[in-house]
Amino acid sequence: MNLRESCRRAAEILRRAEVPEPDLDAWYLLEYVTGVGRAAYFADPDREMTPQQQDAYEACIRRRAQRIPLQHITGEQEFMGLLFRVNEHVLIPRQDTEILVEEALGQIRNGRLPVSNDKGQTAEILDLCTGSGCILLSVLYYAGRMKGQAVRGTGSDLSEKALETARDNAKRLGISAAFVHSDLFENLTGRYAMILSNPPYIRSADIEGLQPEVRLHDPRMALDGDADGLAFYRRITEESGDHLEQGGILMFETGCDQAADVSELMRGHGFADITVKKDLSGLDRVVYGRYSK
């Protein structure tokens, strides 16, 4: 079967399975299996697939029709222009989270992170609930390529499997970072100039209403923020004062309806200059503030 016909039939299978954007996913999987880019495809859409390619493509389409995430089939996801390994142990990086990285880089670029005397001019960054490491590693990658403060980074997670994935991503990208197995701050010492986190924030009762790709295949521990979705924001905000430098920044990704509640939590625990940033859809997405003892 040729490329065009294979892709058309695959898209129809995905459409019947109610997969979002079936044409796009059929194309991505065709490119993944054959290595044929768009230019080559349009130049010769009648090129025949090998039997091995056809078998592999059909297997991928069957898995996608079962609502297994595309990224779990290919094993990777682009984020901030970098390619990250992903699997069932980590949350798949999403474009909305890039707002958090961009805001963190803005603080670094403008020299707004405090540094303690024993660390020279290097600012220490902590990423809680690091998962694949996409937030921390993206910050370190781009901070190392711009004029601004020097930074070092640590990521922590309760899942050892997630940490294995994060370490692998750091190695693949050639980025130096420390990763610690910890229940939030439990196994962490010292103070940080900036703490970043995209914690679990979905209300427990809302999880069953999520798309199958998320509900069945993202790790539940990376989704469930307890009854009101704010459990991790409370814990992190309450404990962060013991782990931030004076004037340090705490920065969260939030659900689109949680920015006001998270801002209020931060005000109640010594944070000032609280800022809310919207995502590309105009929804509240990032909240951060500066700690003052």
Image: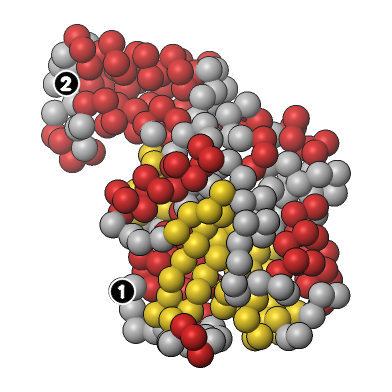
Judged from the image, the secondary structure of the residue bearing numbered disc 2 is: loop
Badge 1 local density, few (<14 within 10 Å), some, or many (20+)? few
Which residue type carries mark 1?
Arg
Please name whichever residue, 153 or 230, is drawn nearer the observer in this view of the structure.
Answer: 153
Asked whether residue 195 is in view, the answer is yes
From this viewpoint, is residue 99 visible? Answer: no
In the image, residue 204 lies at what x, y percent?
80, 39
Q: Nearer the viewer, residue 62 or 46?
A: 62
- Identify the residue at horizontal 73%, vertical 74% (top origin): 241
Q: Indicate the quadrant containing the N terminus: top left, top right, bottom left or bottom right.
A: top left
For label 1, the residue is: 145
35 to 96, vertically: above or below: above
Q: Which image quadrant for residue 128?
A: bottom right
Instruction: Say whether residue 35 is left or right of residue 172.
Output: left
Instruction: Tell me where residue 236 appears, x and y as whole percent.
Output: 73, 62
Mark closer to the observer (2, 1): 1
Q: What residue is at 39 percent from the left and 84 percent from the top?
A: 148
User: Would residue 259 be found to the left or right of residue 156 on screen?
Assistant: right
Q: Position of residue 225 (x, y in %)?
A: 76, 46
Residues packed near mark 2 inside 10 Å, few (<14), some (14 to 19) or many (20 plus) = some
- The residue that mark 2 highlights is 46
> Relative to 161, does residue 79 appear above or below in the rendering?
below
State left or right for residue 48 relative to residue 93: left
Q: Looking at numbered disc 2 in the image, what kind of residue is underneath it?
A: Asp
Going from N to C along the chain, the mark reached first, 2 or 1, is: 2
Residue 238 figure quarter: bottom right
Residue 211 point in image, percent of width and height: 64, 31
Q: Which residue is at 16% across, 14% downward?
A: 50
Along the viewing direction, whichever of 117 and 109 lies nearer the viewer: 117
Mark number displayed over residue 261: none
Residue 247, by quadrant, is bottom right
